[in-house]
Amino acid sequence: MRRLNLLLIVVVLVSAIGVITSQHQARKRLQALEQERDRSNNLEVEFGQLQLEMSSWAAHTRIEKIAREKLGMQPPDMKKVQKLGVGQ
Protein backbone atom coordinates (compact mmCIF):
# COMPACT_ATOMS: atom_id res chain seq x y z
CA MET A 1 0.00 0.00 0.00
CA ARG A 2 2.88 2.34 0.77
CA ARG A 3 4.37 1.74 -2.65
CA LEU A 4 1.07 2.59 -4.29
CA ASN A 5 0.78 5.81 -2.27
CA LEU A 6 4.35 6.75 -3.11
CA LEU A 7 3.76 6.00 -6.77
CA LEU A 8 0.59 8.09 -6.77
CA ILE A 9 2.39 11.00 -5.11
CA VAL A 10 5.15 10.86 -7.74
CA VAL A 11 2.57 10.73 -10.54
CA VAL A 12 0.70 13.72 -9.07
CA LEU A 13 3.94 15.72 -8.69
CA VAL A 14 5.05 14.95 -12.25
CA SER A 15 1.60 15.89 -13.51
CA ALA A 16 1.64 19.15 -11.54
CA ILE A 17 5.08 20.04 -12.89
CA GLY A 18 3.81 19.29 -16.41
CA VAL A 19 0.80 21.58 -15.94
CA ILE A 20 2.96 24.39 -14.55
CA THR A 21 5.43 24.05 -17.43
CA SER A 22 2.71 24.06 -20.08
CA GLN A 23 1.03 27.12 -18.53
CA HIS A 24 4.34 28.95 -18.45
CA GLN A 25 4.99 28.14 -22.10
CA ALA A 26 1.46 29.24 -23.03
CA ARG A 27 1.97 32.58 -21.27
CA LYS A 28 5.32 33.12 -22.98
CA ARG A 29 3.79 32.35 -26.37
CA LEU A 30 0.85 34.65 -25.72
CA GLN A 31 3.25 37.43 -24.78
CA ALA A 32 5.25 36.83 -27.97
CA LEU A 33 2.02 36.88 -30.00
CA GLU A 34 1.03 40.23 -28.49
CA GLN A 35 4.46 41.66 -29.27
CA GLU A 36 4.16 40.51 -32.88
CA ARG A 37 0.68 42.02 -33.14
CA ASP A 38 2.04 45.33 -31.87
CA ARG A 39 4.88 45.12 -34.35
CA SER A 40 2.42 44.33 -37.15
CA ASN A 41 0.27 47.33 -36.23
CA ASN A 42 3.32 49.60 -36.15
CA LEU A 43 4.41 48.34 -39.56
CA GLU A 44 0.93 48.96 -40.98
CA VAL A 45 1.01 52.54 -39.70
CA GLU A 46 4.49 53.05 -41.14
CA PHE A 47 3.38 51.57 -44.47
CA GLY A 48 0.47 54.02 -44.63
CA GLN A 49 2.80 56.91 -43.88
CA LEU A 50 5.22 55.77 -46.58
CA GLN A 51 2.39 55.50 -49.10
CA LEU A 52 1.35 59.07 -48.31
CA GLU A 53 4.93 60.25 -48.64
CA MET A 54 5.36 58.40 -51.92
CA SER A 55 2.19 59.91 -53.38
CA SER A 56 3.34 63.40 -52.44
CA TRP A 57 6.76 62.80 -53.99
CA ALA A 58 5.12 61.63 -57.21
CA ALA A 59 2.57 64.47 -57.43
CA HIS A 60 2.43 65.96 -60.93
CA THR A 61 2.77 69.54 -59.69
CA ARG A 62 5.93 68.67 -57.76
CA ILE A 63 7.47 66.90 -60.74
CA GLU A 64 6.58 69.78 -63.05
CA LYS A 65 8.07 72.31 -60.61
CA ILE A 66 11.35 70.36 -60.37
CA ALA A 67 11.47 69.97 -64.17
CA ARG A 68 11.04 73.71 -64.66
CA GLU A 69 13.21 75.03 -61.82
CA LYS A 70 16.05 72.54 -61.47
CA LEU A 71 16.23 71.06 -64.96
CA GLY A 72 15.17 74.12 -66.94
CA MET A 73 12.61 72.14 -68.91
CA GLN A 74 9.62 73.72 -70.66
CA PRO A 75 6.52 72.20 -72.23
CA PRO A 76 6.88 71.77 -76.01
CA ASP A 77 5.34 74.21 -78.41
CA MET A 78 1.88 72.89 -79.26
CA LYS A 79 2.51 73.59 -82.97
CA LYS A 80 5.32 71.02 -82.91
CA VAL A 81 3.35 68.29 -81.13
CA GLN A 82 2.04 65.49 -83.30
CA LYS A 83 -0.97 63.43 -82.33
CA LEU A 84 -0.73 59.71 -82.79
CA GLY A 85 -3.61 57.73 -84.19
CA VAL A 86 -4.99 54.57 -82.59
CA GLY A 87 -3.25 52.21 -85.04
CA GLN A 88 0.18 53.83 -84.91
Image (spheres, helix red, strand yellow):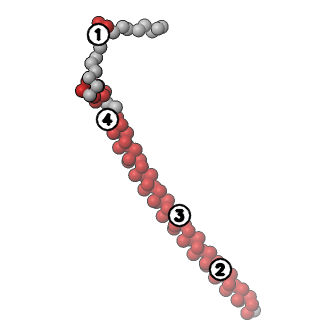
Q: Looking at numbered disc 3 in the image, what kind of residue is underneath it? A: Arg
Viewer-nearest residue: 18 or 77: 77
Residues under numbered marks 2 and 4 in contact, where contact means CB atoms less than 8 Å apart: no
Cα gap from disc 1 to disc 3, whole angstroms: 67 Å
Which of labels 2 and 4 is toward the front? 4
Quarter of the view holding residue 10: bottom right
Question: Reading the chain from its start, which is encountered first: label 4 or label 3?
Answer: 3
Residues under numbered marks 1 and 3 in contact, where contact means CB atoms less than 8 Å apart: no
Residue corresponding to mark 3: 29
Q: Which mark is residue 14?
A: 2
Q: Secondary structure at mark 1?
A: helix
Q: Is residue 25 left or right of residue 50?
A: right
Q: Which mark is residue 78?
A: 1
Q: Is residue 61 at least partly visible in the picture? A: no
Quarter of the view holding residue 81: top left
Q: Looking at numbered disc 1 in the image, what kind of residue is underneath it? A: Met
Q: Position of residue 5 (x, y in %)?
A: 71, 89
Question: Reading the chain from its start, which is encountered first: label 3 or label 2?
Answer: 2
Q: Secondary structure at mark 2?
A: helix
Determine whether 66 is above or below 42 in the image.
Answer: above
Cα gap from disc 2 to disc 4, whole angstroms: 63 Å
Using a 10 Å C-alpha cutoff, classify the residue at mark 4 as few (fewer than 14 neighbours), some (14 to 19) or many (20 or more). Answer: few
Viewer-nearest residue: 13 or 53: 53
Q: Position of residue 44 (x, y in %)?
A: 41, 47
Q: Position of residue 86 (x, y in %)?
A: 45, 9
Question: Reading the chain from its start, which is encountered first: label 2 or label 4?
Answer: 2
Q: Is residue 68 left or right of residue 44?
A: left
